[in-house]
Image (cartoon, coloured by chain):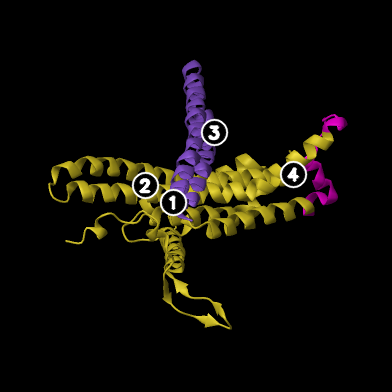
Amino acid sequence: MDIESAKLIGAGLAAIGVIGAGVGVGSVWSSLIAAVGRNPAAKPNVELYAWIGFAVTEAIALYALVISLLILFK
Amino acid sequence: MERKAAVANPIEQFEIKPLIDIDVGGYNLAFTNSSLMMVAAVVLATAFLTLSVSSRSLIPGRLQSLSELMYEFISGLLRENVGSKGRAYFPFIFTLFVFVLLGNVMGLFPYAFTFTSHVIVTFGLAAVVFIGVTVIGFAKHGLGYFRMFLPHGVPVFIAPVLVPVEMISYLSRPVSLSVRLFANMTAGHIMLTVLGGFVISLGGMYVVPGVVPLAFMTAVTVLEIGIAMLQAYVFTALSCIYLHDAIHMH
C-alpha cells in the first residue's frame, strides 16, 4: 500500500472521532430542553452553560478533525 | 478554460504571506497579512471603543450603548466567575475578548485573513492566560497552590492516582484552550472554501445546480458568525474560570 492511499484511509478513520461530538452535543441540548421544560423560569440560568457546554464538547470533535487534516495534508 | 483553478485548495487560505520583509539579525520579522489583520483589529477596537463613548452622555445613544453592553457583558462575566477580586483583571480579560472576537469575525469577510486560525497565535494567547493564572495562584497562595492537585476532603490513599491525573488535566488547559479556538476557525473556513468550490464546479456551466450549495453556504456562513462570537466568549469564560480557580482554590 503506498503512502497516499494510507494517508487517505488514515484521514477517514480519524474523522470517525466526531461521533463523540454528536452524542455529547445532543446530550447537552437534551438536558437544556428537559430543564427548561420542567422549569421555564430557570432558562436564563442554564442557557449560558448550555452554550459553554456546546462549545467545549464541539472542541473534542474538532481535535479529531485536526488530526484527520494533519494526516491528510502533512 | 483553466479547469485547475475551478476547485480551490482549502489549505491555501491559511498561508501567511509577507507584505513587508523585515530582516533583523537573521530573524524574519516580516510584516505579514496576519500582522495586518491584527493591527486592523486593534485599530478598529480602539477607534470604536473610544469614539463611541466620546459624547459621554448619561443616557447613551446607540453606539455608546454598544460599548457599554460589551463592558457590562465582560464585567458581569468576571463578577460571576471571580467575584469582586476580579476587577483587577478586567482590562486583560476585556482585551482578550475583543481581540479574539475581532480576529474571528474579521476573517469572515472575503479576502480577509483569520489570524486566530493559526495555532501559534491562539497558543500564544492561551499560554499568556495559563502562565498568568499560575503565577497569580502562586502569588496568592504560595506553595499552598499545589493543593490544587489534591482538593480538601479527598482521602489520601487515592492521591497517587489523583495527583498525576489532576496535573495532566491542569497542564492540558492551554492546549485545549488554543486548539479549541484554532480548530473551530480552521474547520469553518475550510468548509466554506470547499462549499465555494462546489458552487463553482456545479454552477459553472449551468447556473441552477450551483444554487443548492450556495444556499447551504449561506447557512454555514451564518453558523460561522455564531461560532466566531461563541468561541470568543468561551475562550474568555474559560479564562475567567481558571482565574477563579487560582484566586479561590476550588
- Mark 4: amino acid: Met
Marking on residue A49: 3
The span from disc 4 to disc 2 (Cα, nearest Å) is: 36 Å
> What residue would you read off at disc 4?
B167
Residue B50 among those drawn in magenta: no
Q: Chain of mark 1?
A: A
- Mark 2: amino acid: Met
Q: Residues within 10 Å of mark 1 (few under 14, many from 20)?
A: few
**Does residue B93 appear left or right of residue A68 in this picture?**
right
The span from disc 4 to disc 3 (Cα, nearest Å) is: 25 Å
The span from disc 1 to disc 3 (Cα, nearest Å) is: 43 Å
Mark 2, secondary structure of its residue: helix
Mark 4, secondary structure of its residue: helix
- In the rendered image of the structure, the colour used to display chain B is yellow
> What residue would you read off at disc 1?
A4
Q: Most extreme residue toward the front, as rendered? A: A1
- In the rendered image of the structure, the colour used to display chain A is purple
- Answer with mark 4 or mark 2, whichever residue precedes in sequence: 4
Q: Residues within 10 Å of mark 2 (few under 14, many from 20)?
A: some
Residue at (17, 51) in percent of width and height: B204
The answer to whether dots 3 and 2 both sit on one chain is: no
Q: Are marks 3 and 2 in contact (CB under 8 Å)?
A: no
The span from disc 1 to disc 4 (Cα, nearest Å) is: 39 Å
